Amino acid sequence: MFKKILAAGLTLSIILSAGTFTGMAAGIIVDNETFEVDKVESTDAYGVVVAPQEDRGNAGATVKEDVTVNASDKDTDISGVGSISEHKQTSDATVDGDVTVNDKGWNDNAYGVEVRSDDESHSSASVGGDVSVSSYGEHSGLSTHTSGIYAENNGGDIDVSVDGNVNVSSDNTGNRSDSIATGISAQSTDGGQTNIEIGKNVTVDGEHDVAGIEVTTEPKSEDTAENNIDIIVHGDVTSSGDGMKIKCSDGGTVDVVIEGTLSATDDAIVLEHLDNGDIHQEDRLNITVWKIESGDKEQLVKSKNANGESVSDNISNKVEKSINYIIKVAPEQKDSITLLSGIEKNNGFDTAHEGDNVAVKLNIPSGYYLSAAYSDSGKNIKLLKNESGDYYLVVPKGGGVYVNMVLNEIIYDNSDYDNDDDDDNESTYKPDIINNSNSDPYTSAILEAFNKEPIYNDFNNTFYYHVEFNLSSNDFIFTSSMIEALCDSDMRVKENIVIGFTDMSIPLTKGQSLMEFYKKTLFKGSKSVNDLELLESHGTGTFTARQPMEVPENTYSELPDRIAVITI
């Protein structure tokens, strides 16, 4: 590619050493020092290529706006931005705007950003906007490859960064049945480090052989360094074919991070089978992703031979089990949700493997109670609770963990409060019970108590909670929503709870019948028959006890001092 570009440049483009220009209508090759231009709109085979010549030093180019290439009938490779170095030199290409390549037919390969490095050289390319490549029509070459980012390292170092998206579309059905479309394609031989970072999403829509990310490292020879490729995508990777294709030989390592979802119409991850050397790719792969979606939901990683046929081995299973799934927490709730255990840091992310248990602590903000807690963004999978009442989650196949809570505000409505001295010093406090489910102050206090640490544990899996209402016991009100919070469908108490008043405390025991509690305490000697009938029929009324309550002797006088009191 390096020689083909220079040969074409003598007749089809402008070769420049240094300077600043407002705009160019032809392709640009920079082979010495630095060059700056406002924008490039080219009908040549390339937009801007930085390719320092031997014995002429390093080279660099900056385009302040966009690079656009519209090429047809070139009978060669085309690229929007190229950074190519050898002979221990440095090449750097920078585009502040977008890079757009439109391959209109009868060309060979089409690349948005093409970076190559040989012989201990360093090649870099950075794009401030998006990279978009479209390839349509018939092609002239023996191979047809359309790629957003193409990096080939032969013993040097490569750095590529794109702040925006990488979009690739290919419809090469004219005369190529083996056309290839990739979002990112990285190859490494003869040692060297390759770094590629994408700020947003990678999307590939093509025919035939399609992959969001394609990575190949060749076997290491005795006199070369390892081939290491690191790729990070801060958004999603979406492919109309396979998600990733990886061929990682024993000559290096591959580290891929996808902060979002890896979505593939076909297979999620394909390991291209190695015919020689150490075939255990699982020892050299490090894959970190938030979520995986693919056409085959049962097997996320597959091994295939050179003919694309599935190969039965244990390597794919090991790689699938080793995938690091990012455990996300809702950004707005990071101060309220803590991942306690079961996670490990990987590339700066909290991660876990499929099937791992992750302990979660929920810190309910003051003034709120927990309505529900989930481990997925769609709020379909609730957090689990162990025997100790602690929350946890199990990482599912394909990941996608997103811990979040639904919080409801505790509503205090004392608008009916009246403590007129003319009432013979009798309190006429009667709370205004709001009809919305779980919104009255009593229910809110109980729910908030359940979301705090229990005040006592008798070490027989029995936990006690404390709720305190700032009113006397003979003014206590049971509402239908409070009963729903306290009891199951059989009107039996869900958890051990101490209901505290200003003048006494009432213990309710898990499994206790609230009906029996009513008969023995609140309604003993009471003539509120209508209220009792409403309770028995599971009505929606408000149940009020005006008679003094007779309760068992309080056995909780020796509870620890650290009682979380909720006062309403």
Image (cartoon, rainbow, N blue to C red):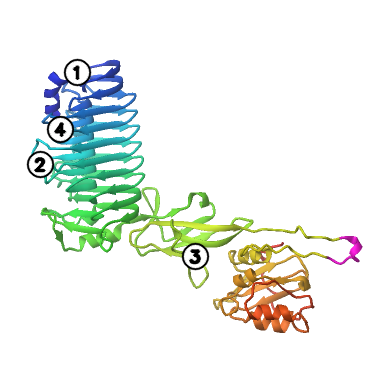
Is 421 magenta? The answer is: yes
From which residue to which does the magenta span run? 420-427
Relative to residue 328, is residue 288 drawn left or right?
A: left
Vertical side of 399 occupied by 142: above or below: above
Instruction: Please rate how many residues cluster around mark 4, counting C-alpha atoms within 10 Å: few if below 14, some from 14 to 19, many from 20.
Output: many
The residue identified by callout 1 is: 14
Relative to residue 339, is residue 527 drawn left or right?
A: right
The residue identified by callout 3 is: 391
Q: Along the polypeptide, which appears first: circle 1 or circle 2?
A: 1
SS label for mark 4: loop
Q: Single out the mark in the foreground, 2 or 3.
A: 2
Residue contact between numbered discs 1 and 2, judged by CB atoms under 8 Å: no
Instruction: Please rate how many residues cluster around mark 2, counting C-alpha atoms within 10 Å: few if below 14, some from 14 to 19, many from 20.
Output: few
Residue sitting at 60 percent across and 68 percent down? 454
What distance separates the C-alpha of mark 4 from that of mark 1? 18 Å
Q: Nearer the viewer, residue 416 or 40?
A: 416
| Whole-percent x, y for residue 135 in the image | 20, 37
What distance separates the C-alpha of mark 4 from that of mark 2? 17 Å
SS label for mark 2: loop
